[in-house]
Amino acid sequence: MAGGKPSPIFLERSSYARRRIRDAARTVPLLGGLLVMLPLLWPSEGEDAITTVSAFLYIFGVWAIMIGIAALLAPRLNKREED
C-alpha cells in the first residue's frame, strides 16, 4: 500500500452480518431442493413403504418452512447500511 492506510484485517460487524444473511438466503433454495427430493429415496414397496399422502404432507411442510425462513430473512436483506 503506497503510503495509504492499510486495509483492516477484519470486517465491520454490520457488513459481516449482512454477508452471512446473504449466504443463508443463498443456501435456503439448495437445502429446500434437497429436502424436497428426499421422498424419492423412501421405500415404495414392502413393509416399510411410505404412503403418497405422507410424502405430499412432507413436501408441503418443507415448502411452508422454506416460506417461513424466506419471510424471516427478507427484511434483513433489505436493510441499508447506516451512514
Image (cartoon, rainbow, N blue to C red):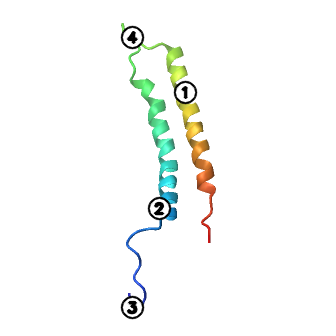
Q: CA distance from mark 3 to mark 1?
A: 56 Å
Say whether disc 3 or disc 4 marks the residue closer to the N-terminus: 3
Q: Which mark is residue 37?
A: none
Can you identify the residue that label 2 sits on? 16
Verify CB contact (< 8 Å) between mark 2 and mark 3. no
> With respect to residue 29, does 11 lie above or below?
below
Q: Nearer the viewer, mark 1 or mark 4?
A: 1
Number of callouts: 4
Work out whether residue 57 or residue 13 is closer to the camera in this orientation and state it. Answer: 13
Q: Which mark is residue 61?
A: 1
Work out whether residue 80 or residue 66 is closer to the camera in this orientation and state it. Answer: 80
> With respect to residue 21, does 41 lie above or below?
above
What's the residue type where badge 4 is placed?
Answer: Glu
Say whether disc 2 or disc 3 marks the residue closer to the N-terminus: 3
Q: CA distance from mark 1 to mark 4?
A: 23 Å
Q: CA distance from mark 2 to mark 3?
A: 27 Å
Can you identify the residue that label 4 sits on? 45
* Element under disc 1: helix
User: How busy is the neighbourhood of tag 4: few (under 14 within 10 Å), some, or many (20 plus)?
Assistant: few
Q: Which mark is residue 2?
A: 3
Quick one: quadrant of the N terminus?
Answer: bottom left
Residue 72 in the image: state x and y as whole percent: 59, 44
